[in-house]
Each structure stands twice: as structure tokens, then as C-alpha cells.
Image (tube, rainbow, N blue to C red):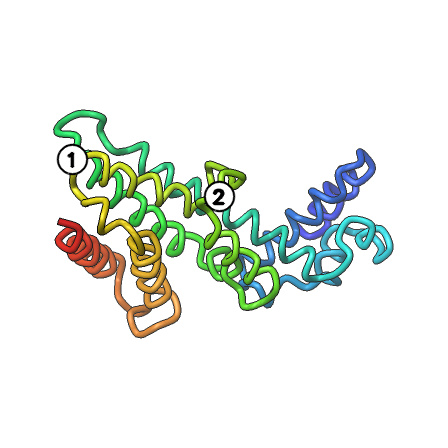
Amino acid sequence: MKDSRRSRSADTYHHGNLRQVLLECAVELARAGGPDAVVLRDVQRMAGVSNSAAYRHYSDRDALLAAVTEYAEAHLADAMLARLGSVANRGAKNKRAIARFRATGQGYIDFALAEPGLFRTAFAHTQAGRDVHMRYSVAADATINERHPFRILMRSIDDLVATGVLSPDRRDGIDEAAWAAVHGLSTLFLDGPLSDADAARKQLITNRMLDLIDVGLQ
């Protein structure tokens, strides 16, 4: 497998896509071992290229890790949007808004459980990780991509306000509180005392957490 991967990487490199090859190798490492596994020399070895060739695309480990972080963030958004897409577009508007809000949280936790290495990498305590947190904190800015995970969450809360589930005077701080809830539970599932719970138990706990948020909103 290693030889075939190196051969594919070399072929792609010769077609001018080395940056993408390096990213794919780094993502593979992150997926298996989290942010600590993203080591530039290992990525170079997997891609079958020299240090100088790799450094033309990623100046150092932080630059490479930042790219993997963005990849993980985009796939987190995909998981949230996939859950949103499963919500039926029928019934009372307020109930649909609540269902969409719950779906964003469920999608977030789905991604954490399905891709623990990438989830940890997205929130690594490095400059790349701090940059992600900064992007979350300024996600209300119009320049932020509409597919940004925090923007997806914000839109679902906008729906809660628009449909009368949440009064406008209670809106401030809800975005961050909801994020803290799903992120905290995700972390407990991956690296905390709830890591040994089976899948059914984790889903039950997730449902209860989302129920509590629903009650608090109304």
C-alpha cells in the first residue's frame, strides 16, 4: 500500500498538484492520530518528495496544520449540513426551526464521533487551532463563508427567532452557549469519562442534552 500511495503521489506531483498531495497525506495522518501526527517530514516521506519541494508549498508545520484544520472545519460543516438536509420541510414553522437547530448539534457530534482525529485537529492548541477559534468568534462578519460551521449554527438560531421560538432579547450569547454544549459533550465522548459509553448510550445522552437546550430556549 505504501508503495502504491507513493507512486500515485509522484504521478500527481508530476502533474503539478503536489500541494494537494501533501494535504491529502497530512489529512491521512491527522485522521489516524490527531494533530500531533501531522509531522512535515512524515508527510514528505508519504508523498515521496524532497524537503525543498514540500517547503515550496508549506513553509513549516504550522502552515500545513492550518491547511488540515481548514479541511477538518469544512468537513464538520458538511456533517452539519447533511443533518440539516434530513429535516423534513413540512409541518409548523416553529417545530421545523427547532428540528433544524437540533440537527446542527447532532451533525456536530456525528462528525466528532466519526472523525475523532480530524475533530481534534480542528481544535488543536496550536496557532492553527487558535486561528480557527478566532474565525468562529468573528463568524457574524459578512466576509465569513456561508458554509462556516458557526455560521450554520447562527442561521439555525436566526430561524428560532424568526419563528417565535426564541425572543430577540434572549438571542445574545445563545450561539456561543449552544456551541459550548455540543463541543463539550463531543469532547467528553472522545477524551473524557464518557468515552467508554457505547453508541446507543452516547446517542441517548446527546438527545437529553438537546432536549435540555430546547427547554431552555422556550
Q: Secondary structure at mark 2?
A: loop
Q: Decide which of 147, 2 is in the foreground and name it.
A: 147
Q: Decide which of 35, 183 is in the foreground and name it.
A: 183
Q: Is residue 206 left or right of residue 139?
A: left
Q: Pointers 2 and 1 in contact (CB under 8 A)?
A: no
Residue at the spot 64% in from the left edge and 54% down from the top edge: 26
Return the x and y of residue 31 as percentages of the image width and height: 53, 56
Q: Of the residues shown, which amino acid type is indicated by label 1?
A: Asn
Q: Is residue 111 left or right of residue 156?
A: right
> In the image as oriented, which residue stretches furthest toward the bottom?
193
Q: Decide which of 26, 184 is in the foreground and name it.
A: 184
> In the image as oriented, which residue stretches furthest toward the top?
90
Identify the residue under disc 1. 94
> In the image as oriented, which residue stretches furthest toward the front?
169
* Number of the label disc, if any, that sits on residue 141: 2
Residue at the spot 50% in from the left edge and 49% down from the top edge: 73
Vertical comparison of 63 with 95: above or below: below
Residue at the spot 69% in from the left edge and 42% down from the top edge: 20
Return the x and y of residue 100 as percentages of the image width and height: 26, 38
Q: Decide which of 137, 34 is in the foreground and name it.
A: 137
Instruction: Give the image quarter of residue 104.
Output: top left
Residue at the spot 54% in from the left edge and 63% down from the top edge: 34
Q: Earlier in the sequence, mark 2 or mark 1?
A: 1
Tag 2: Cα neighbours inside 10 Å, few (<14), some, or many (≥20)? few
Q: Secondary structure at mark 1?
A: helix
* Number of the label disc, if any, that sits on residue 183: none
C-alpha distance separating marks 2 and 1: 26 Å
Return the x and y of residue 94 as percentages of the image width and height: 16, 35
Tag 1: Cα neighbours inside 10 Å, few (<14), some, or many (≥20)? some
Return the x and y of residue 9 as percentages of the image width and height: 74, 43
Vertical comparison of 125 with 115: above or below: below
Q: Of the residues shown, which amino acid type is indicated by label 2?
A: Asp
